[in-house]
């Protein structure tokens, strides 16, 4: 049993990554192609099939017991379909059945990328050993997922925990999702940069107007850059506190490029949490940076596949919680 592997696919708007992963979370083989995001549906699927084909030509493939897919959302895990915002040709695309066909009938399981990142952090990262946690990716967008009662909780369609699109500002700006005042509309990298520029922040001589550049300016003491990160931290804190109050999470794990800002984000986030997480049962809430980095999608897809492959033991770990 310990020699069993699972196959993992991480499908996003820029890359399609595949891997064979063992029960200890070690990636034994990788494959990767850029996503032909603006091509037709079959061209995108052909890229997925090529990635799978590279894996299946390995002698290791014979040990694969299941395939896990983490995909940019929205996904519908109950229908086996995906409609990634950044891949316009895929709308209700039947990814699960197509992957099953391409992979010779192994069982296939699909989750959204936020849920996949959560499964990865619960298996091998900062939420290891946690009974109840919220894991978030804060980058171009804001996504997330939940661990409840010691297990990732994908929800019926694989999207549960999508904290980026809960409102923390009732009369706030319209969000591309159709809502108003969403966490993502305030805390994503592009929105941190936009707000800093709108308030008069001037980029350096290289003209870099990314959130990372705003973070560097904040680290150097630029008050407008600091304020933009404080506002993002406030939105994240309100969303995290609401989640903790609803389902009693013990920790919030935050990954993604914006989390790379480090204390520029985490210090005001911890301060703001004290303003919003006020009830006795949420005051002990902690926040921690994610640990699984760029492999979060693959590891999370693998963790999810391990569960259906009944690779017992792989997701049972003792950790910080
Ligand atoms: Zn929204």
Image (spheres, rainbow, N blue to C red):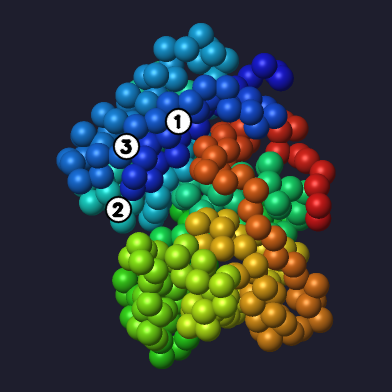
Figure check: 189 above or below 201? above
Q: Quick one: SS at disc 1?
A: strand
- Would you say residue 268 is visible in this rendering? yes
Name the image quarter holding residue 273: bottom right
- Would you say residue 80 is visible in this rendering? no
Furthest residue toward bottom: 171
Figure check: 65 above or below 302? above
User: Residue shown at 39%/24% (left/top)?
Assistant: 52
User: Residue shown at 33%/51% (left/top)?
Assistant: 84
Where residue 257 sits in the image (x, y, percent)?
Answer: 50, 57
Where residue 222 sits in the image (x, y, percent)?
Answer: 52, 79
Residue receiving disc 1: 18
Figure check: 103 above or below 93? above
User: Residue 86 shows which numbered tag?
Assistant: 2
Asked if the beta carbon under badge 3 is closer than 8 A to the nearest atom of ligand 1, the reply is no
Earlier-in-chain disc, 1 versus 2:
1
Where residue 70 sits in the image (x, y, percent)?
Answer: 47, 43
Q: Nearer the viewer, residue 104 or 29?
A: 29
Residue receiving disc 3: 34
User: What separation in Å lies between label 1 and label 2 (alpha carbons)?
Assistant: 19 Å
């Amino acid at each position: 049993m310990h020699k069993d592997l699972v196959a993992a696919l991480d499908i996003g708007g820029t890359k399609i990554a595949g891997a064979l992963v063992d029960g200890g979370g070690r990636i034994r083989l990788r494959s990767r192609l850029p996503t032909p995001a603006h091509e037709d549906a079959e061209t995108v699927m052909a890229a997925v099939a090529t990635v799978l084909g590279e894996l299946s030509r390995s002698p290791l493939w014979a040990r694969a017991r299941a395939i896990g897919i983490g995909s940019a959302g929205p996904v519908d895990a109950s229908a086996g379909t995906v409609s990634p915002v950044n891949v316009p040709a895929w709308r209700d695309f039947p990814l699960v059945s197509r992957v099953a066909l391409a992979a010779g009938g192994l069982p296939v399981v699909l989750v959204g990328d936020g849920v996949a990142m959560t499964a990865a952090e619960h298996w091998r990262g900062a939420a290891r050993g946690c009974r109840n946690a919220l894991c978030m990716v804060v980058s171009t967008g804001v996504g997330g997922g939940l661990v409840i009662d010691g297990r990732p909780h994908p929800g019926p369609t694989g999207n549960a925990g999508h904290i980026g699109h809960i409102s923390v500002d009732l009369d706030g700006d319209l969000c591309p999702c159709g809502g108003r005042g969403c966490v993502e509309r305030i805390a994503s990298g592009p929105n941190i940069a936009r707000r800093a520029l709108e308030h008069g922040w001037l980029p350096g001589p290289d003209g870099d107007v990314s959130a990372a550049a705003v973070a560097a300016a904040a680290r150097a003491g630029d008050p407008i850059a600091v304020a933009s990160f404080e506002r993002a931290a406030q939105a994240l804190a309100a969303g995290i506190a609401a989640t903790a109050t609803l389902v009693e999470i013990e920790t919030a794990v935050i990954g993604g490029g914006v989390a790379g800002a480090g204390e520029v984000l985490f210090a005001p986030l911890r301060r703001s949490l004290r303003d919003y997480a006020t009830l006795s049962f949420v005051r002990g809430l902690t926040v921690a940076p994610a640990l699984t980095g760029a492999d979060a999608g693959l590891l999370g897809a693998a963790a999810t596949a391990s569960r259906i492959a009944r690779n017992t033991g792989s997701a049972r770990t003792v950790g910080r919680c």
